[in-house]
Amino acid sequence: MSIYEHFRKEEHPFIDQVSDWKNTVEEEYRSKLSDFLDPRQQYIVSSIVGGNSSVSVMFEGGISTAERKRALLYPDYVNPATEDFELKAFELDYPVKFVRIDHPQVLGSLIGLGLKREKFGDIITKGDKIQFVCASENASYIEHQLTSIGKAKVSLFPIELEDLVDKEESYIEKSTTVSSLRLDVIISEAYNLSRSKVKPFIQTDKVKVNWRIADDPSLIVEKGDMLSLRGKGRCQIESIEGETKKGKVRIILRYIGSG
């Protein structure tokens, strides 16, 4: 059975990339460090590397609750250390009494420096404290170039990974029934919107499935998929419970938010 059969078509290029990483480790007896991966990509890496191979994998994002992590594929005789993941952490210094800075603003400013999303990990906001993790090869550039966020002047000071604050996530679950597992049906139910309103959201790139823009209303969602609607937060398909007597599908949605 082909590994591709277990994943969506749009994930096949990433599967090929991970297979190349694994082959490099096997053939050249050296470790391979990835950029920051989202949880779905981490799952794919774990699936491909498997448990019965001469190649092992570890993930690190700076804190135990990190969502985005770098993957280190390495020969099974190697004992990786945190330093091998080449992470750097920063905290923002800004006028907290006069300015409010939120997660999307920090994300937008980092991308505005010309960085790909894969080059930095979680952005952690807790009270007035704002921290983030990045790849060490980009740390100096970020430290010198990120001087403002929105209208606020900011500066960065390096911190140790041990000084990062853990994120506190809260969630609520909702059991409901839907007529099908189409993306537009699920988004409509999850966010209490009519399907006529949902379709334009999908067609204008405001909906993501597993951290990737999803522009096909007929896409069939699966257990474990993470969905998001811009400005409305995220929810995950926690489980698919089967059909009711009336032919509907019972599902459990988990809404995820920062505590």
Image (spheres, grey):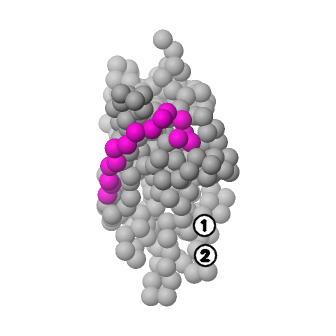
In the image, residue 77 above or below residue 229:
above
Q: Residue at x 54, y 78 (%)?
A: 154
Q: Residue at x 54, y 35 (%)?
A: 182
Where does the magenta region start and end?
170-185
Q: Residue at x 56, y 68 (%)?
A: 105
In the image, residue 158 above or below residue 46:
below
In the image, residue 49 above or below residue 190:
above
Crowding near the residue tagged with mark 2, few <14, some 14–19, many ≥20 C-alpha atoms within 10 Å: few
The residue carrying mark 1 is 109
Q: Is residue 218 left or right of residue 72?
A: right
In the image, residue 58 above or below residue 133:
above
The residue carrying mark 2 is 150
Q: Amino acid at mark 1?
A: Ser
Q: Amino acid at mark 2?
A: Gly
How many numbered callouts? 2
Q: Is residue 184 magenta?
A: yes
Where does the image place residue 104, in percent across and percent down from the top left? 54, 65
User: Are discs 2 and 1 less than 8 Å apart at CB?
Assistant: yes
Please say whether residue 78 is visible from this viewpoint. no
| Quarter of the view holding residue 50 | top left
